[in-house]
Image: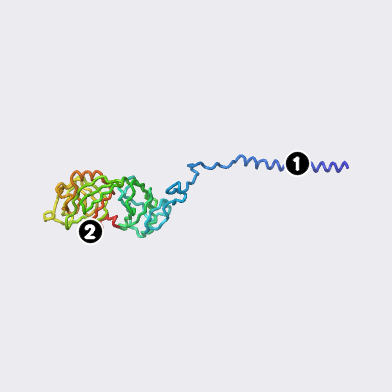
C-alpha cells in the first residue's frame, strides 16, 4: 500500500510539473501579442489613407467618378488625369502655352517635338491632358513635329490645365472668359466677360473683294505700333489698293494678315459700312481698350460675313 501511495504521489508531481512547463511556455506568446498592438486606423487626411475617387457632387454617392478612359479620336482624346508611366516614345517636347502662363479661353495646346513623329497614334497615347474642371477635347496634327489639342468648346473661365507629354510636364490656366463677337450684319463688336456683356463697339470689316471671313479666331500677339504694308501680300503700295501706313494698337488674330486695330480714317464708316482690306477697324479709343483688355488666346468670332476662315495659316484651330 505504501508503495502504491508513493507511485500515485509521484505521478501527481509529474503532471503538475508538465502543466507548469506548458504554462511557462505560453507566457511569452501572450506577452508578445500585448507588446505589438494593432496599428490604429488612419484618421482622415493621414498619409496612409487612400482617398476615394472624387465625384462631381460629394453628397451624391451615385455621381460619376470622373472621365472615362477613352482612345484617341474620340471627343475625350488625351483627357487623362493619370501620369504617363510608360517607356519614352519621344524626346522631351516644348509647350505653348508655357508653364505658368495665364491665357484666354480660346488658346489651344501646342506640343512641339524635337524630331518628326512617325507613329502618331503612339505619340498621342503618351500625351495626357487633365484640367479642373474636366473638359472634352481633340488631337490634331499641324506637322510631323507639332501636335495640338484643344477643347471641343472654349475652356471654362479659370480652368487649371496640366500637360504630361511622355513624362515632360507643364501647366497653365485660363483667365476670365473674354470673348469678342463681331456681327457683320450689324457691324458691331460685342465683348462679353464670363457671359456678361461688357462693351459694344462699332466696327468696319473687309470691303467687297477683301471680306473678313466667318470663323473663330484668337489673339496671337499684339503691337502697340506697327507699319502695315500691302506689298507683303503681293499688292504694290503704288497700286490703287496699295498702302503703307502706320497703325496703333494692332492685335493679330490670324497669320494671314488680319489684325484688330485702330483706324482713325474709318471712324465715320464704323458701324455703317465695310471699307477695310480685311482687318476689323475700331476707333482709336476703342482699339486702345481692346488692346489693353485682350491677350493671348482670347477668342474673336466673326459672324454673318462672307466666306470661312479655313486658310492653313497655323491659327485656324477652331475650324479644324
Residue most toward the front? 186
Kindly identify the residue that appears in the image at 45 percent across and 46 percent down: 59
Kindly identify the residue that appears in the image at 67 percent across and 40 percent down: 27
Pointer 2 residue: 307
Closest to the observer, 194 or 26: 194
Residue most toward the right? 1
Pointer 1 residue: 17
Kindly identify the residue that appears in the image at 24 percent across and 48 percent down: 190
Which dot marks residue 225? Answer: none
Q: In which quarter of the image is residue 206?
A: bottom left
Say whether residue 241 is left or right of residue 173: left
Say whether residue 68 is left or right of residue 258: right
Q: What element carries label 1?
A: helix
Q: Few, some or many C-alpha atoms within 10 Å of disc 1 (few <14, some 14-19, many ≥20)?
A: few
Vertical side of 11 occupied by 320: above or below = below
Q: Can residue 246 be seen in this view?
A: no
Quarter of the image where the C terminus is located: bottom left
Question: Percent x, y for residue 117?
Answer: 34, 58
Say whether residue 91 is left or right of residue 50: left
Q: Distance between the residues labelled 1 and 2?
A: 107 Å
Q: Is mark 2 on a helix, strand or loop?
A: loop
Amino acid at each position: 500500500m505504501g508503495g502504491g501511495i508513493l507511485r500515485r504521489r509521484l505521478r501527481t508531481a509529474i503532471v503538475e510539473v508538465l502543466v507548469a512547463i506548458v504554462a511557462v511556455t505560453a507566457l511569452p506568446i501572450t506577452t508578445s501579442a500585448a507588446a505589438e498592438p494593432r496599428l490604429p486606423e488612419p484618421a482622415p487626411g493621414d498619409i496612409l489613407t487612400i482617398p476615394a475617387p472624387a465625384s462631381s457632387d460629394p453628397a451624391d454617392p451615385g455621381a460619376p467618378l470622373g472621365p472615362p478612359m477613352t482612345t484617341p479620336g474620340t471627343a475625350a482624346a488625351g483627357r487623362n488625369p493619370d501620369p504617363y508611366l510608360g517607356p519614352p516614345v519621344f524626346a522631351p517636347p516644348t509647350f505653348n502655352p508655357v508653364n505658368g502662363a495665364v491665357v484666354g479661353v480660346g488658346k489651344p495646346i501646342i506640343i512641339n517635338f524635337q524630331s518628326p513623329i512617325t507613329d502618331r497614334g503612339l505619340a498621342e497615347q503618351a500625351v495626357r491632358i487633365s484640367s479642373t474642371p474636366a473638359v472634352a477635347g481633340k488631337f490634331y496634327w499641324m506637322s510631323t513635329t507639332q501636335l495640338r489639342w484643344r477643347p471641343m468648346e472654349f475652356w471654362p473661365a479659370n480652368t487649371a490645365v496640366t500637360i504630361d507629354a511622355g513624362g515632360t510636364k507643364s501647366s497653365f490656366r485660363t483667365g476670365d472668359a473674354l470673348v469678342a463677337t463681331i456681327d457683320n450684319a450689324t457691324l458691331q463688336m460685342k465683348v462679353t466677360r464670363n457671359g456678361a456683356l461688357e462693351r459694344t463697339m462699332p466696327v468696319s470689316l473687309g470691303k467687297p473683294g477683301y471680306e473678313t471671313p466667318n470663323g473663330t479666331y484668337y489673339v496671337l500677339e499684339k503691337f502697340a505700333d506697327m507699319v502695315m504694308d500691302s506689298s507683303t501680300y503681293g499688292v504694290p503700295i503704288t497700286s490703287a489698293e496699295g498702302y503703307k501706313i502706320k497703325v496703333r494698337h494692332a492685335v493679330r488674330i490670324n497669320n494671314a494678315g488680319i489684325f484688330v486695330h485702330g483706324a482713325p480714317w474709318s471712324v465715320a464708316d464704323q458701324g455703317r459700312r465695310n471699307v477695310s482690306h480685311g482687318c476689323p477697324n475700331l476707333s482709336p479709343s476703342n482699339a486702345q481698350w481692346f488692346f489693353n483688355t485682350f491677350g493671348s488666346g482670347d477668342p474673336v468670332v466673326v459672324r454673318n460675313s462672307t466666306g470661312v476662315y479655313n486658310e492653313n495659316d497655323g491659327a485656324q484651330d477652331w475650324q479644324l
